[in-house]
Image (tube, grey):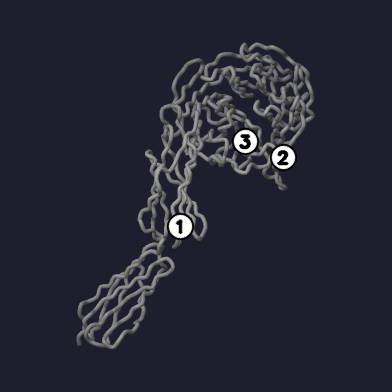
């Protein structure tokens, strides 16, 4: 997995400086290397973020919830991280949304919805909507209307469980949506799927099994479509939604679920069933906080809260079937923040930039502008797999060597390949193998079964390279060898007898203690079997015999072998005198 040390440009209070950040050193920025600009936000809370790709502006709202005495500042930045404006909304700001043509920024505060021209940043209209003066609200633009949530007449301290209403504003008129939920509701919509609105209820004391639903907002309507709750009969598995994302084509909903073991749920938007293939789990110790699809539909960003060098941000192909090694960022430090805030991710429409808001968990807030690679290239296994040694043996190391080739700019660290072995016992996953800088790799295995074994090696790609077509090699695994060595005297007497010492060696899987060897004696009277000899723990044995005749006597020691080992035979001739 690739993890970058972000040699980012840091912009704070209008001063451009440099900062060292946590992770593995990355190469200098290029077309295939992500850049990360970090802006220290002059705010101590976070309400929402909206990206205007038409005018290349990012709006970040402060949010003093449950306190109406503070004004709601909206900071405005360009795509390079320079602050270019400030909207000082009189009341506490919470939800923001952008019109479909990017001409209007809608700001939902404690009692109004105010429209701002996205170029001049001037107010163009104000609609008084309700008297919910204490709780933050969510906002989204869908079906030609602004949708927002509010908690009517909520009192201070009740926002966590107070019922929210979903309403809309269209042409200065307010209409009730008819949908409610205890506790905060989050809203998600995308201009590419203009009539879908995703609504997610928060997990709170008044909603132990919160819902997720998709509403049809065509022409300002609010027709509920699929709805799903996730808790099992025993109450486990309930959603703990921190963010939702709707894919640009409107077919998928991703949910940042802090209770879900994998962190990010991927659902089919038409019925909210689980997608056939989901995303790999977030790193151990990371709790999901945010999720966003890129505007071009190619990538998904997954934000998290994690400690130390554990990644807080992953960027990867939006289609989980494409695989690929995520691009990872571990935010840590005074110049960086240490986690992505809930709902703190947004993309530009063309997918060329990702905007992420991080926090230090106290008062610090940062805006990171990440520039992922603009395109993906092909990768391939350039040669077949070569085998070493040439004859595979059960229970002994086997190496399969290969090489990866990359189109475009090669990754600075090509990552790893994975491999599986399939034999008569089934399929066995082997340990992942790092790929060298020149693309070469060696998959190591110790086959544990005699017979045919087929190895399949895969490369799942990375952010800049598509997965390679798998490569396979079938290997015949033979039995391990064994060997008997004898040390016998050249001459002996019939009266004193014959003493022979020997060693027994077997490769591959270890044999059980006390292996027995067969001993046969051949003389001029014929051939007969003597008492078997047991091999000691050190592999040695000793044979003592009183020959029955003189002249040449031959001793043969043998082992028949077993399912995993070849047999072995050795003999020694002794001239016996009187």
Q: Is residue 225 left or right of residue 374?
A: right
Q: Secondary structure at mark 1?
A: strand
Quarter where residue 529 is shown: bottom left
Find residue 258 and report its horizontal and vertical position in percent: 62, 37
Q: Secondary structure at mark 2?
A: strand
Find residue 487 and report its horizontal and vertical position in percent: 25, 73
> Which residue is under mark 3?
256
Find residue 103 and report its horizontal and vertical position in percent: 65, 16
Count of marks placed on residues: 3
Look at the image and tell me whether residue 271 can be seen.
Answer: yes
> Which residue is under mark 2?
228
Nearer the observer: mark 1 or 3; the answer is 1
Find residue 402 and report its horizontal and vertical position in percent: 39, 46
Q: Do the residues bearing badges 1 and 2 touch, measured as CB atoms within 8 Å?
A: no
Instruction: Please give the name of the residue rendered at 75% of the width and 30% of the height, measured from the top-left corner.
Output: 162
Label 1: how many Cα within 10 Å (few below 14, some 14–19, many 20+): many
Name the disc covering residue 453, or none: 1
């Amino acid at each position: 997995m690739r993890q970058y040390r972000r040699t980012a440009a840091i912009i704070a209070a209008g001063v451009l400086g440099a900062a060292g950040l946590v992770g593995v050193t990355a190469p200098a920025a290029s077309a295939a290397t992500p850049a990360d600009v970090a802006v220290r936000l002059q705010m101590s809370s976070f309400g929402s973020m909206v990206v205007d790709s038409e005018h290349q502006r990012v709006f970040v709202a402060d949010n003093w919830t449950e306190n109406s005495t503070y004004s709601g500042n909206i900071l405005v930045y360009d795509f390079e991280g320079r602050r270019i404006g400030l909207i000082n909304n009189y009341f506490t700001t919470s939800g923001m949304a952008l019109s479909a043509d990017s001409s209007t920024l809608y700001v939902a505060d404690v009692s109004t919805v105010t429209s701002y021209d996205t170029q001049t940043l001037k107010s163009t209209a104000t609609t008084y909507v309700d008297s919910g003066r204490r709780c933050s609200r969510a906002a989204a633009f869908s079906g030609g209307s602004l949708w927002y949530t509010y908690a009517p007449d909520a009192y201070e301290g009740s926002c966590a469980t107070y019922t929210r209403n979903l309403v809309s504003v269209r042409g200065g008129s307010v209409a009730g949506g008819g949908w409610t939920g205890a506790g905060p509701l989050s809203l998600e919509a995308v201009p590419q799927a203009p009539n879908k609105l995703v609504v997610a209820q928060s997990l709170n004391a008044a909603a132990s099994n919160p819902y997720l639903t998709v509403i049809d907002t065509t022409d300002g309507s609010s027709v509920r479509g699929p709805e799903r709750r996730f808790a099992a009969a025993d109450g486990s598995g309930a959603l703990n939604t921190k963010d939702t994302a709707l894919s640009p084509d409107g077919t998928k909903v991703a949910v940042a679920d802090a209770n879900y073991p994998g962190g990010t749920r991927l659902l089919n938007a038409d019925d909210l069933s689980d997608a056939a293939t989901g995303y790999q789990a977030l790193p151990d110790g990371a709790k999901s906080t945010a999720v966003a699809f890129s505007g071009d539909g190619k990538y998904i960003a997954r934000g998290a809260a994690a400690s130390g060098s554990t990644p807080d941000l992953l960027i990867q192909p939006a289609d989980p079937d494409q695989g690929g090694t995520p691009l990872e960022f571990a935010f840590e430090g005074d110049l960086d923040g240490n986690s992505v805030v809930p709902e703190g991710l947004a993309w530009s429409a063309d997918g060329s930039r990702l905007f992420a808001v991080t926090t230090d968990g106290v008062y610090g807030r940062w805006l990171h502008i990440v520039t992922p690679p603009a395109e993906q290239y092909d990768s391939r296994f350039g040669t077949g797999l070569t085998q070493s040694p040439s004859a595979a043996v059960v229970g002994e190391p086997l190496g399969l060597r290969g090489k990866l080739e990359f189109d475009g700019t090669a990754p600075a660290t090509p990552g790893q390949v994975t491999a599986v072995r399939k034999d008569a016992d089934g399929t066995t996953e082997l340990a992942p193998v790092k790929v060298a800088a020149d693309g070469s790799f060696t998959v190591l295995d110790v086959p544990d079964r005699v017979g045919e074994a087929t190895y399949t090696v895969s490369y799942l790609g990375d952010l800049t390279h598509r997965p390679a077509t798998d490569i396979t090699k079938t290997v015949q695994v033979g039995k391990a060898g064994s060997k008997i060595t004898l040390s016998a005297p050249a001459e002996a007497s019939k009266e004193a007898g014959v003493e022979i010492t020997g060693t027994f060696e077997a490769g591959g899987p270890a044999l059980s203690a006390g292996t027995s060897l067969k001993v046969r004696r051949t003389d001029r009277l014929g051939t007969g079997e003597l008492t078997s000899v047991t091999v000691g723990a050190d592999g040695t044995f000793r044979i003592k015999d009183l020959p029955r005749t003189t002249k040449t006597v031959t001793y043969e020691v043998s082992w028949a072998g077993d399912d995993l080992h070849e047999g072995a035979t050795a003999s020694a001739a002794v001239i016996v005198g009187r």
